[in-house]
Amino acid sequence: MNVVSLFNGMNTGRQALENVGIKVDKYYSSEIKPYAIQLTQHHFPDTIQVGDVTKWREWDIDWKSIDLILSGSPCQDLSAAGKRAGINGSKSSLFFVFVEILEHIKSLNPNVLFLQENVGSAPTKDVGIMSRALGLYPVRINSELVVAALRDRYYWTNIRTKETMFDIVTDIPQPKDKNIKFQDILESGTTDRVKSNCVTEREYKNIYKDMDKLKAHIERKRKQGFEPLIHAVEGEKIRNLTKTEFCRLQGFPDNYCDTLSLPKAISLLGDGWTLPIIEHIFSFINK
């Protein structure tokens, strides 16, 4: 397959294709974070970096040869954790750039496959806008089914599980529950939670080296009615998670982010896709 991946992040789409046995001929990545590009090129040095998504008309791509286009457009303006500016917000409105590119490819290759993902807490109005723009409604899957973390997301895709006359709904089924507990992925220590919080890009900003401050932060958040940042208990002490544990929360191999610092790894993992979920969706391409 020839693939265009917008907002490529840590390259989960490419890794998922490899893991389900789909050969990639050319993989074009649109990404601007230097450390995301660094991680991508470390694992897949043949990735073709094309830069800023808003400059897509300048890219040297044979668009009619593209078989699959991927998009995890920014969720900051849609998430309940953000300011709720909506789909027309300065960041989340980049979704419409994806639509422009998709329509351009479809005019040359009507059979192109696509996958678009966004946050599960997006307002219903905005989900409707995105669905009408793409011509189908999404499936909602929580990553808790396949990893130890809560991660509620919408997925729009024309990858079909069967031939059907009803093509206005994403028909990817829910993955089988692997029943992975938060405790299962810890390298040491314990946790009183069945599942971890959703990993977020902002998580690295809340890493406290002072454990007393960390404990105070946890107590303060709980009084406000929120679950605090992800943590574990080591004896009598509360500790932050390790890089390995953060990778496990998104279904990646333990050493996947070894070339990055902990803050950069958390930033990419928090802003990215859950690997086993994307594998599940791509498993229906060959079928």
Image: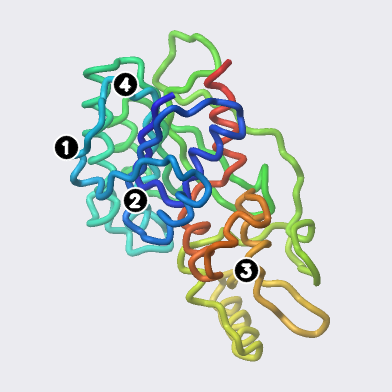
Task: Give amino acid for label 4.
Answer: Ser
Disc on the earlier residue, 2 or 1: 2
Near mark 2 (Cα within 10 A), the count class, few <14, some 14-19 or many ≥20, is many
Tag 1 near tag 4, CB within 8 Å: no
Instruction: Count numbered badges in the picture.
Output: 4
Q: CA gap, disc 1 to disc 4?
A: 16 Å
Task: Give amino acid for label 3.
Answer: Ile
Near mark 4 (Cα within 10 A), the count class, few <14, some 14-19 or many ≥20, is some
Near mark 3 (Cα within 10 A), the count class, few <14, some 14-19 or many ≥20, is many
Which residue is label 2 attached to? 31
Residue 216, image x, y percentages: 61, 87
Which residue is label 1 attached to? 57
Which residue is label 3 attached to? 230
Disc on the earlier residue, 1 or 4: 1
Tag 3 near tag 4, CB within 8 Å: no
Q: CA gap, disc 2 to disc 4?
A: 21 Å
